[in-house]
Amino acid sequence: MGFHGVSWVSGSWEEDGGVGGQPGIMFELLDGTQAGAHADELRALHAEVYGRGDDGSFAGRFRVLRRQPGFVLAEARHGGYLVGYACGMPLRPSTSWWRHLTAPLPDEVTAEHPGRTFALVELVVRASWRRQGIAEALHDLILAKRPEERATLTVLPTAIAAQHAFRKWGWRKVARARDAAPGSPVSDVLIITLGQGRSARWGPP
């Protein structure tokens, strides 16, 4: 489980006047097959943002992720240049998402059934394109018209800007978690109720 910062018909949308005053930002939703064709661009952007060399871990993780049932990726481009993306998928009833909590939660919170929870697992924007509303637009697009009851993500407690943004967008902390891998950091687990009209601007009614 981690957050650094589902089959869909592809659709695109260009914001009038641009995002945050930047004209020509094009947003598009991709399914797993379509996202796979952009894997090299996504890997390069991920490495740039997190300052990590290409050790093959992203490629392997993304290959597994994009093959999950219901996977979806929202990307933002300016003149064809990838400036950010978000991706996620619905949680299965057998998910391990809630397995590594530092303190137990009631079953009514952690029990999963088809259609209950969408997991937002990545939200990445190039440094030079931040503070222009792109992350919020990607966030809204990927969650728009989701059929699930709620969404979840994990974010580091020290990621102050991300923490502030998610709370502003309506997320709330319900737990902390630590992956089983040695040296894994503690992350905050956030959730948001879907279907509250935040993302109504995206797509046809």
Image (tube, helix red, strand yellow):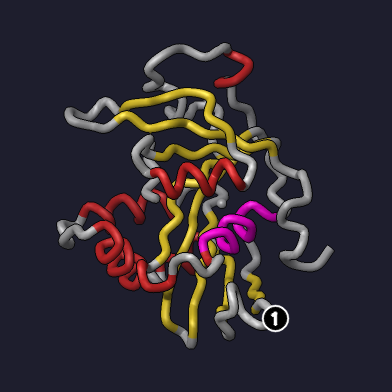
Horizontal and vertical percent for residue 71?
52, 52
Q: Is residue 36 left or right of residue 106?
A: left
Can the viewer see residue 7? no
Res. 180 in view:
yes
Q: Nearer the viewer, residue 199 or 161?
A: 161
Residue 190 painted magenta: no
**What residue lies at 56% left-to-right and 65% top-to-bottom?**
133
Q: Closer to the camera, 171 or 31? A: 171
Q: As rendered, which of 197 and 19 lies closer to the eye?
A: 19
Give the residue furthest to the right.
Answer: 205
- Whether residue 141 appears in magenta in the rendering, the answer is yes
User: Where's residue 117, x and y in %?
Assistant: 61, 36
Q: Which residues are magenta?
A: 135-144
Magenta segment's dominant SS is: helix
Q: What residue appears at the point 41 percent right and 21 percent down from the top-left corner?
A: 99
> Is 175 left, or right, of 192 in this rendering?
left
Residue 30 appears in which quarter of the rendering? bottom right
Q: Give how far across and how far down residue 77 sits, in percent.
A: 49, 77
Q: Which residue is mark 1?
A: 16
| The C terminus, quarter of image | bottom right
Which element type, helix, strand or loop, lies under badge 1? loop
The amino acid type found where label 1 is placed reads: Asp
Residue drawn at point x = 59 percent, y = 74 percent: 19
Residue 182 vertical position relative to residue 83 in the rendered view, above or below = above
Q: Is residue 110 above or below residue 29?
A: above
